[in-house]
Amino acid sequence: MRGGRLSSVLVVAVSATVLAFPAEAGQHPVQAPGGRVAIFYYPWYSTPARDGGWAHWYVDRDGAPVLSTAYFPSRGLYSSSNAKVVDAQMREIAEAGVDTVIVSWWGWDSPEDKRLPLVLQATARHGLGVAIHVEPYRGRTPESTAEAISTLHAKDGIRDFFVYDADRDPTADWAAVLAPLQGVRVFAQTTLVGKARASGFDGLYPYDVVTWNASLFRRLCTEAHEAGLLCAPSVGPGYDAWFATNDLLVRERDRGATYDRMWKGAIRSNADLVTVTSYNKWQEGTQIEPARSQIGRPGYEGAWGSSGLTAQRAYLTATAGWAGRFRSVARQ
């Protein structure tokens, strides 16, 4: 769901705390990640030439296809099954100072599941970790989620799992299936700290960068730490889903200032890790993947005073700067 020049932003240095989890606090006590940055990634794009049809790039409006995003990718409308594209994306993500790619996953045999090996190969080449974003696919239950976590951990060595819309299922159901899991960290997409703890999650993240902003992060992380949970605030550049969903709610990018404010709040919150919403969710306008100007599509012109090719990559550049600042604070 839903969302000044970098050199002029003053980052308030707040020492990062290494959490000591009380024995009774969680089902899977884990060490705090320590200044790591993770980004949500969507391997769900298809094109006729490579996949036999379009997926996610267009929506139907009165029987006619309409581009589903307010922006336009610099690399064009690509297929997520194109190994060269995926490799280039992982290289960009690594160069932006990100440690982990959180891959959108919609259940067994979904397009995203079938493309996971391609992502794993590319991340390995570029020294990136992989986590799974367990999406609200049809038929998902706490039981099926725990089963998938166990299988993906055993098969691919994946350790971190982020469960979107965790609040939709009863606390007792989560607690029963998460307790037996070993060797993994499971994060709930929620701002309800008490529910996340009672459900047996190891941490939480908001994901949504339009409902929530940086003013949430300090309170959320303070409450999470008091409950013995990891806190992974979600930062994003903005939000605009009108083309895809007719949603009138917009969070303007403000030439990069929105992204700066969210990063500044995340660092001040004493976060354990920062999650970025997103690398390439074009339909909600949260992406930081390079974009170019097209008629009716603004690109990132003016972001941090940039233009042209520099503007196209401005959010990757900014991410690298903020990731470095976050790590330097976490080391103190």
Image (cartoon, rainbow, N blue to C red):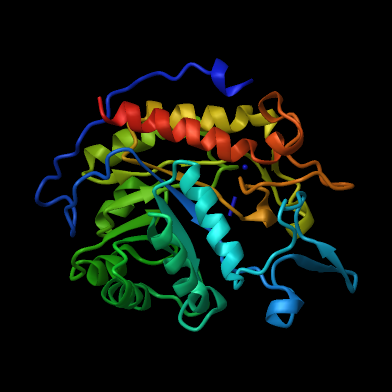
136 up-or-down from 270: above or below: below
Q: Is residue 121 left or right of residue 28?
A: right
Relative height, residue 29 to residue 265 (above, below): below
For residue 147, what is the image quadrant?
bottom left
Which percent across, then down, holds residue 188? 37, 56
Q: Residue at x 31, y 40 (%)?
A: 272
Choose between 329 and 199: the one closer to the eye. 329
Q: Residue at x 38, y 54 (%)?
A: 127
Query: Where does residue 56 sit, x and y in percent of width and height?
Result: 70, 67
Quadrant (top left/top right/bottom left/bottom right) for the C terminus = top left
Q: Is residue 24 visible?
A: yes
Is residue 234 found left or right of 74 in the rendered image? left
Q: Residue at x 11, y 45 (%)?
A: 22
Q: Position of residue 99 (x, y in %)?
A: 39, 48
Q: Measuring 87% from the left and 46% from the top, which residue is drawn there?
A: 296
With 178 as the anchor, is 298 left or right in this view?
Answer: right
Q: Please count the marks in the image.
A: 0
Residue 135 shows in this picture: no
Task: Pick whichever, 194 or 116, lies toward us.
Answer: 116
* Residue 68 higher or lower than 296, as above or below: below
Q: Position of residue 6 (x, y in %)?
A: 57, 23
